[in-house]
Image (spheres, grey):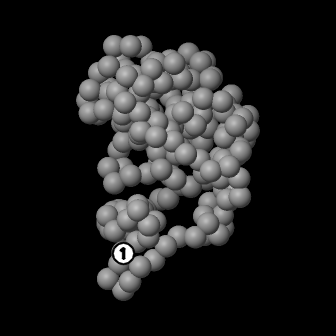
Amino acid sequence: MKNLGPPHLSILCFVVASGLSPLCDILYEYPDIGLILGFVERWHLENNTFHLPIGEMTISLDDVWSLLHLPITRKFCSIENLEYEDSFEILTSLLGVDRAITYDELNQSQGGQVKLSWLRELYDSCCDNELWEFVAHAYFLHLVGCTIFANKSATYVRTHYLELFRDIPTCRRYA
């Protein structure tokens, strides 16, 4: 998140309306990449636990609330991976990306994901052109791709998360 910085003042109202503003403050100066990757590799999605040499460990909802200040008692957030065509559609409609550029990015990223660096460039471009709705969508995708939905690559974010931001005020309803 430090590479992108705080949200542009013109989209601050969107960020506050979404309920995700606490994530904007997560700016680690010196993350221990080895430690983070070690935890990511030991994460078992099927039972939501870390399998460590000393035993199993899990992160509780109370941990999420106290560390990230995100609500934990609202509507469950459920999304499915998008096929190539659906990823193509959501990038062009919610980020306003040209079809040729979308095609190139999805092919380089090998499917339903985009590079965080590409998102930062798109964010800057949309800010320069004052396309605030696209700026907000790009910011949100980058925000969740660097924080709550980060993956092992640390350079890509899945496009299906954009579906959560189709209607920004409804984000506040999710846990």
In the rendered view, does 53 fall on the left or right side of 134?
left
Quadrant position of residue 94? top right
* Rendered residue at 70%/37% (across/down): 170
Q: Position of residue 135 (x, y in %)?
A: 57, 27
In the rendered view, does 10 fall on the left or right side of 144?
right
Q: Position of residue 68 (x, y in %)?
A: 62, 60
Q: How many marks?
A: 1
Nearest the camera: 72 or 101? 72
Give the residue number, with chain letter if any, for mark 1: 51
Find the residue positioned furthest to the bottom. 54
**Residue 4, visible in the rendered structure:** no
* Rendered residue at 34%/54% (across/down): 152
Q: Is residue 43 above or below residue 136?
A: below
**Residue 57, visible in the rendered structure:** yes
Quadrant position of residue 82? top left
* Rendered residue at 48%/24% (across/down): 90
In the rendered view, does 120 fall on the left or right side of 24?
left
Nearest the camera: 40 or 2? 40
Q: Is residue 144 above or below residue 50?
A: above
In the rendered view, does 90 fall on the left or right side of 84?
right
Q: Position of residue 125 (x, y in %)?
A: 49, 22
Query: Which amino acid type corresponds to the residue marked 1 in the rendered image?
Result: His
Q: Residues within 10 Å of mark 1 (few under 14, many from 20)?
A: some
Q: Position of residue 32 (x, y in %)?
A: 38, 66
Secondary structure under tag 1 reads strand
* Rendered residue at 36%/34% (across/down): 112
